[in-house]
Amino acid sequence: MKRVLAAEIGRVEVVDVEEPTPPPHHALVRTLASGICGSDTHAVAGHHPLLPPPYYPGHEAVGVVERQAADGTGPAAGTRVLLKPNVACGECVNCLAGRSNACQRLAWVGCDPSGAYPGAMAELFTAPSRNLYEVPADAADEQAVLVECLATPVHAARIAGDITGARVVVMGAGTIGILMLLAAREAGAGTIVVTDLDPAKRDRAVRLGADAAVDGAAEDFAEQVQGALGGLADVIFDCVAMEASARQWTQLVRRAATICIVGVPPRDFVVPMPLIQDWELRVQGCAAYTEVDVEKALTMAARIPADEIVTAQHPFEDAAAAFDEAARFSSGKVLVTPGGARR
C-alpha cells in the first residue's frame, strides 16, 4: 500500500509498504482523510524541537474501521471513526488523575520518529481501539478530520478555568486560533478579540464570531484591543507562542489574569518575568487534550466551519505538493486523501 513519509528535512515522499498487521488491542482503519498539521510542516522544515524526520505523518485523521480489534474492543468494522493520536499508558500518576495528555510515557500515532506508531497518512493505519471514536452521522469528513485540532482549544478553554463572561484575547487567527475562538465561545466567554498580522485571517475571525480583530503589528495595538474588549483581558490564549506575542501579554491583561500557551513555541524565548511575578499572572501550558476534550469536541463536529478552514485536498501521490502548500499558506488546513476529492 501507499504511505506518506517525511523522509528528511525538506523532503516528503510516498513509499510502498506492506499493509500493517494490527497488534493486540489495535484496529485496522482505512483512511478517508488526514490533515497536515503545523507540527508536520515545522518538522519537515527542521524547526520542530521534538519531531525530527524521518517519520510517518498523519495524526489528524478520519477513517472507516476495516478490522475491529481482535479482542472485540472499540468500534466495529464499518464504523466511521476519528483518531485520538496521543496514546497514554493509563497507569502513571497523571493518567490516574485524568490527565492522560501529560502521561509519563506518552506516545503519538503519526508523530513518532521511532516508527512504533506510523501515522494515518496512508491507505491503512492501525491504532489502539480505545483511541478511536465514532464520528457523528451529521458531521462531514472535512469536519470530522478537524475534531482533533478542535480538541486542543477545547482543552485550553477547560483548563483556563471558568471563563463565563470573560474578556478574552486569542492571539493568532490560523486554524488553531479560529478553533480557539469557537471553543472559547462554547465555554461561555463574553467578549473575544482576535489578533493577527494577516487582514484576511482577521476578517475570517470576525465572520466566525469574534467581536473584533486587531492587527498584531498596529502602533496602537494595546489601545485597540482594550477598546474592543471594554477593558483589560481576563484570559489570553496565545496561539502564536513566539517572543513577539509574549512581549504583548502584559500590554493586554489585568493583574491575576491567565495566559494559556496553546501554540507550540519553536524555541526558548524571553518572557516578562518581573510582571508575571508582581501581577501574579498564571502562565499555563496547554498540551493537546484528554479523552474528555475529544468527546466534547465531537459534540461540536457538525458545527465546525470546514468550508472556512479546509483550503485544499490532495491525493496521496501529491503529498509533497500538499506539504508545500500547507507550509506556504498557513491560514487554512490542507488534507491528504485517497482520492483527493471532497466528500
Image (cartoon, grey):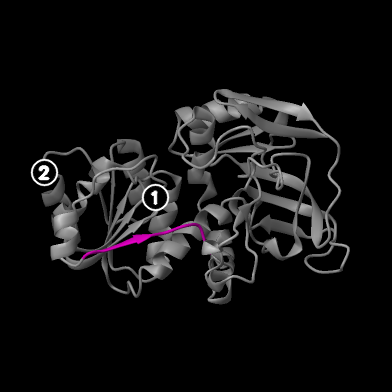
Residue nearer the viewer, 106 or 62: 106
Q: Secondary structure at mark 2?
A: loop
Residue under label 1, please give it.
177
The tag on residue 19 is none
**Tag 2 and tag 1, C-beta contact below 8 Å:** no
Give how far across and how far down residue 314 sits, in percent: 65, 31
Q: Is residue 44 toward the left or the right of residue 226 in the image?
A: right
Q: Which residues are magenta?
A: 281-289
Q: Secondary structure at mark 1?
A: helix
Residue under label 2, please give it.
220
Residue nearer the viewer, 124 or 309: 124
Give amino acid for label 1. Gly
Give how far across and how far down residue 183 sits, in percent: 43, 62
Residue at image location 26% in from the left, 45% down from the top: 245
Where on the picture, by quarter, is residue 130?
bottom right
Residue 229 seen: yes
